[in-house]
Amino acid sequence: MFEKILVPLDGSEHSIKALEVAVQIALRFNGKITLIHVYSLGGFSFRATPNKEFIEAIRKAGVNILADGEKRAKAEGVHVETVLLEGHVVGQIVKVCREGKFDLIVMGARGLGKIEELVLGSVSDGVTRHACCPVLVVK
């Protein structure tokens, strides 16, 4: 039933809890997990193009978030893959879900602070509205 599970990670406590739930679901249904981290440069205000070092630092933070998630899932014996993308967070998650024909998305209820969430919009809300499969939001 839930053989292909997509888990967006942003390093927040909620996303780590979501990963823990996804691991349990994967174990129960003999499923596989794909971890996705989407970083966006669109939320920053630049007067000039961001330099390579800045972009690489953001990208590396994403790599580290995925590596930590991969380590946690593998420790439980779950097959895991990782995807790192740049772009609109909701759009990229929904696109990967659709193209990968996932059975379930398990994600944290909140990653950003309350003020940032009000300004930028809720990723979990956007994914829930546009996903092509069921979405489990973990608090």
Image (tube, helix red, strand yellow):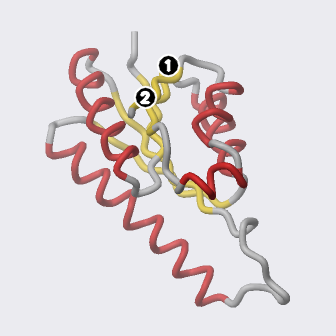
- What label sits on residue 69 in the rendered view? none
Q: Residue furthest right?
A: 47
Picture coordinates of residue 86, whole percent (x, y): 65, 61
Q: Are marks 2 and 1 in contact (CB under 8 Å)?
A: yes
Point 48% across, 37% down: residue: 109
Quadrant (top left/top right/bottom left/bottom right) for the N terminus: top left
- Label count reads 2
Q: Quadrant of residue 116?
A: bottom right
Q: Position of residue 95 (x, y in %)?
A: 69, 37
Looking at the picture, which amino acid does disc 2 mark?
Answer: Ile
Residue at label 1? 103
Q: In the rendered view, does 21 fall on the left or right side of 50? A: left
Q: Nearer the viewer, residue 58 or 129?
A: 129
Answer with left or right where residue 135 lies relative to residue 40: left
Q: Quadrant of the C terminus?
A: top left
- Mark 2 packing: few (<14 Cα in 10 Å), some, or many (20+)? many
Labels 2 and 1: the sequence-earlier one: 2
Q: Secondary structure at mark 2?
A: strand
Question: Residue 91: image x %, image y %?
Answer: 72, 42
Nearest the viewer among 109 and 39 is: 109
Question: Residue at position x 67%, y 43% from top?
Answer: 90
Residue 5 shows which numbered tag? 2
